[in-house]
Amino acid sequence: MRHTRIAIALAATSLALGGCAALGLGEKTAATGTAAQEGKPWLRVEEGEATPSPAVKKGKATATPEVSLSAPAPDPSCTKLWQRTDPALIPVEVTPGPGSLTVDWPTQFGSGYRVAAVPQALVTGPQPEPEWQEVGPGKGCTMSTTLTGLTPGAAYIVWLDAPDTGRRLDGARNLYSGRSGVVYPE
């Protein structure tokens, strides 16, 4: 009985000293502020302190360009429109051939390229380095190269690298890599 009285006294003291906040009842909510009454959403920055969400600014565009879903054609006479499946990768099309893969991609940024067919077979220990095939800068709409000496029916992913692409006005790198899905030479 004595322990019960001590427990009740401690609980009453903590409520008296801490108020309702000890139970979580005194916590500020969005409904208590003037911004909440105006319909503005709230964002928690510090525990127990609510602040209004940042306002959406309208006006001039920022330095970050919007991502287009198709690669820009370097020449208006280009008839092929390259559809991007990922905004950060150069689109790549791969056509299987007998023991080979023909790789096509849009010409971009006047860069040289290197292409590799990376085997997808499991290898224990250190992985073998990919064998890169160098391709010089191209003119026109499309670049193409054929990777030969591949095992028919084996799984590969083609990697494309454009190490000399340079940067945009905002300092971000131009697209400099691409990859295919899994492909199988005939």
Image: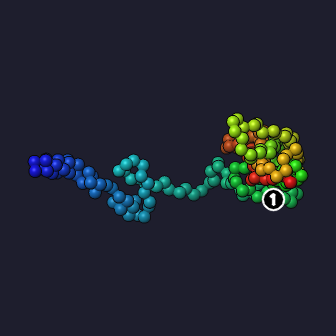
Position of residue 126 measured from the top left corner of the image (x, y, whole percent): 70, 35
Along the line of sight, the residue nearer the viewer: 9 or 124: 124
Q: Is residue 41 above or below residue 148?
A: below
Q: Where is residue 129? Give x, y as percent.
A: 76, 36
Q: Quadrant of residue 35?
A: bottom left
Q: Is residue 37 above or below residue 88?
A: below
Residue 145 percent location from the top left of the image: 87, 47
Closest to the observer: 44 or 84?
Answer: 84
- Location of residue 42 with respect to 137 vertically, above or below: below
Q: Secondary structure at mark 1?
A: loop
Residue identifier under label 1: 81
Q: For the C terminus, give its image quadrant.
A: bottom right
| Image quarter of residue 43 | bottom left
Residue shown at 88% from the left, 53% from the top: 97
Mark 1 belongs to which amino acid?
Leu
Q: Residue at x 74, y 46 (%)?
A: 121
Q: Residue at x 79, y 53 (%)?
A: 183
Q: Is residue 34 visible from the viewing direction of this image? A: no
Residue 83 in view in this figure = yes
* Percent of width and height locating residue 178: 75, 48
Nearer-the-camera pick, 12 or 58: 12
Residue 130 lies left or right of residue 56; in this view the side is right
Within 10 angstroms of label 1, few (less than 14), some, or many (20 or more) residues? Answer: few
